[in-house]
Amino acid sequence: MNSQNQDRLYLVTGASGYVGGRLVRDLLSDGKKVRVFVRDAKKIAQQPWANRVDVVQGTATNSQDLDRALAGVHTAYYLLHSINVSTDFEVIEAEMAKRFADSAEGANVKQIIYLGGIANDENRSRHLTSRMDTGKNLASSSVPVLELRAGIIIGSGSASFEMLRHLTHRLPIMTTPKWVSNRTQPIAIRDVLYYLRSAANLDKPQDRICDIGGPEVVTYAAMMQTFSKLSGLRKRIIIQIPVLTPKLSSLWIGFVTPVPTSLARPLVESLISEVVADPEKSITPIIALPPEGLLTVSQAIELALTRVAENHVDTRWSDAAYPTAPWQKAQSDPDWAGELMLKDHREITTDVSLEKVWEQIEGIGGEHGWFGSGWLWYLRGLIDRMVGGVGLRRGRRDPSHLRVGDSVDFWRVESMEHGKSLRLYAEMILPGKAWLEFTLTEKNGLTFVSQDALFAPRGLGGQLYWYVVSPFHFFIFPTMLRNIVKAARKSHTS
């Protein structure tokens, strides 16, 4: 590696996302100087690399924010998308890419590296078309753009892997649309990161499009069978029927997997046409294959399963914020914004140590559940799914430890002070905004725990919603608090 590369400043956009969070880690391990551009700096505050990077907070639709982020940058990684934000995501993505290109040119950036999607077919989905248009908009300035196009990315925590895993686990017999027989060329997240980090060391800027894929071309049905075999499951019975449209398929996927319908649909639409790397767009002329070779589909799935089993999932698809209802204001609204705040307050005192109580609170949700009233939580999650929300199946990144920005079923960690407080923001579909907050203090050998369910309603409908669900709070919240203490006492004595 050329030593002058070590003096370069690298910008990673989307650093709080699935690929971006891992890329930052890898660039730092290579000794690179890294700046990250994020909408909310709190979301990366507890990343292990947070104090080793320069952080610029802003949005990609604000030229001044982009100018600050790109100042002095040699190579900029563009890992942004708006697929989950709006129905007109193509317009938003086009605007972001064009502004980014203009700011990069003004800042004299030498190289833009963009991770897009393989698109061979003229019958492309909206998602893939938007990904291609993003590349064109990035290339509209004089800054060279190296566009790496990938298909399905297999890795622990990726949306594609979670969709594959849960479909295969939960459905021993499945009726599927005909797209499961289309050819695709998956690539392991390890190999995607290899190409991205290797691109940081190029001596000369590159202005080209390169397809990156694994060593095998398979069908989605074959991937499901491979997954079932590696997981010790029986061979899946797959019955193809022609009437399952992408819309119906995504609704079904949203119902039986943690991946919400809004995200499942572009994933499904991307599989309608064949997603196979074009040999004419090979990356090998500028970046050699990994020394150990590219991972096969079986190896990629096995590695992802190992990471999940070891609870060693660095980033997840759900790290990117899920879109809330359009009337919901930013989570950072000040207290003086004039909102009506409704509250359900509970508290309890126990002789169990604060540390043991905190362990239970930090482990809330996911496989540990919500400490009682399970059927009510399940019902609320089901209702949320039915109206297009994330539901309860999203789970957690880690079963025992949280960090700001983590998703916890249909909540997200908004703030946390270890051993003292945890504040969760609701990402379910609601007529307002909701939080669940725990606060712990210790005095005279006793632990005081307070639990607050907070709701800022939108108009009269939001207020009516609160009063309708309030009776259920008498079952849910006191039970939750008692069972948290009970579980803490049990762990203390065991």
Image: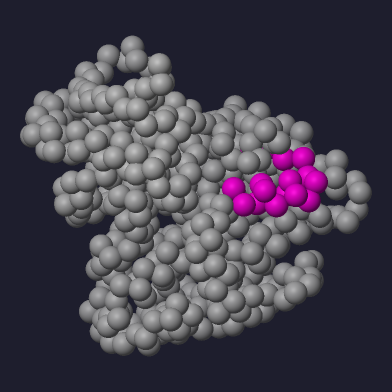
Task: Locate residue 470 relative to residue 291 in the image: left or right.
Answer: left
Q: Position of residue 491 (x, y in %)?
A: 39, 44
Is-magenta flag for residue 177?
A: no
Q: Name which quarter of the figure residue 385 lies in.
A: bottom left
Position of 213 relative to 371 (above/below): below
Q: How is the image coloured?
A: one colour
Q: Position of residue 326 (x, y in %)?
A: 29, 37
Residue sitting nearer the eye, 86 or 317: 317
- Most distant residue in the front direction: 493
Q: Name which quarter of the figure residue 348 lies in.
A: top left
Residue at 67 percent across and 33 percent down: it is 51
Q: Position of residue 244 (x, y in %)?
A: 25, 76
Position of 15 relative to 233 (above/below): above
Q: Name which quarter of the figure residue 464 lies in.
A: top left
Magenta-colored span: 21-36
Residue sitting nearer the eye, 146 or 227: 227
Residue at 39 percent across and 43 percent down: it is 493
* Residue 141 appears in the rendering: no
Residue at 55 percent across and 56 percent down: it is 312
Position of 321 relative to 278 (above/below): above
Is-magenta flag for residue 32?
A: yes
* Residue 287 appears in the rendering: yes
